[in-house]
Amino acid sequence: MTVLDTTNRVVVWATMMQRMSDGRESTALTKAQLRAAVDAIDDWVEANAAAFNSAIPQPARGALTTAQKARLLMLIAEQRYGVG
Amino acid sequence: MATRFVWTPQSVDLVRSAAAQLTVVNGIPVLAFDASADEICDLPGVAPQGLTGTLTLVVFGFMASATSGTVGMGAAVEAITPGDAVDRDTTTAFGAINYATSATVPGTAGYEFATSITLTVSGSLAAGDDFRIEARRDADGTGSTDSATGDWYVTRFELRDAA
């Protein structure tokens, strides 16, 4: 898989700003700074995707789809850090 | 300057495909202008008798989350005099977009601030004209710098003239 294209990175960026607005979460970040974080995290996900997959034990690694693995990662992150 | 019109969020026209969203924040009706793409509302009216001089649009509001950066606003005016050769079924007659000097947002989200746009009208805006002001957040930075994250909650628009 490759990194998200510009259109999809914009979707993530816009969604994040909307959720911060809806939650009245104060931030000193500018739009450009937040966008840089989106790009960097997407790059990191791409760079570490293979390691993430290798960390999943069998048979789950073979039985789960890529989308299911991503969903599991998201659920764990939400449970660890809270939904925000 | 004299106040000629005041628009609340409920009194604007939200008819564009990329319209600002009418919502309620802390019991206050506001227009939520996104940060990621330009959104628009139309301010309709009939130009009052005695309208004179330079027109200024003042926009009041507060940020949902941003505590730094700037917001940009643009406005274009359409003025129709009865008898004008404008087919309103199919065409519009907005002039060029006028951009405000980018406004620095307060250091605390939720604090009210205002920004002003000096309006130039293609032709003129005469008393009795049917007019619309197309007001937009310049989220894509076409004519100003809009760097503040998150929604800008607009509470009022005020039109002033030189009287």
Image (tube, coloured by chain):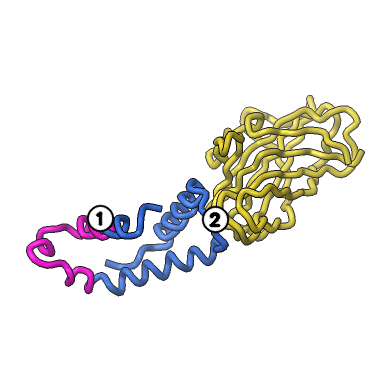
Kind of residue sitting beneath label 2: Ser
Total number of numbered labels?
2
Q: Which is the main secondary structure of the residues drawn in magenta?
A: helix
Left or right of residue A15: residue A28: right
Q: Position of residue B99 (x, y in %)?
A: 72, 52
**Residue extending furthest left?**
A59
Q: Magenta stretch: residue A26 in it?
A: no
Supply the letter of whichever chain is blue: A
| Residue of label 2 | A26
- Judge by depth and name the residue closer to the eye, B87 or B7: B7
Label 1: which residue? A71
- What color is chain B drawn in? yellow
The chain ID associated with circle 2 is A
Disc 2 crowd, CA 10 A, few/some/many (<14, 14-19, 20+): many
From this view, report whether residue B50 is shown above or below residue A69.
Answer: above
- Let me know if residue A55 appears in the view: yes
- The span picked out in magenta is A51-74
* First of labels 1, 2 by sequence position: 2
Question: Measured from the top left, where is residue A21 in percent x and y?
Answer: 51, 49
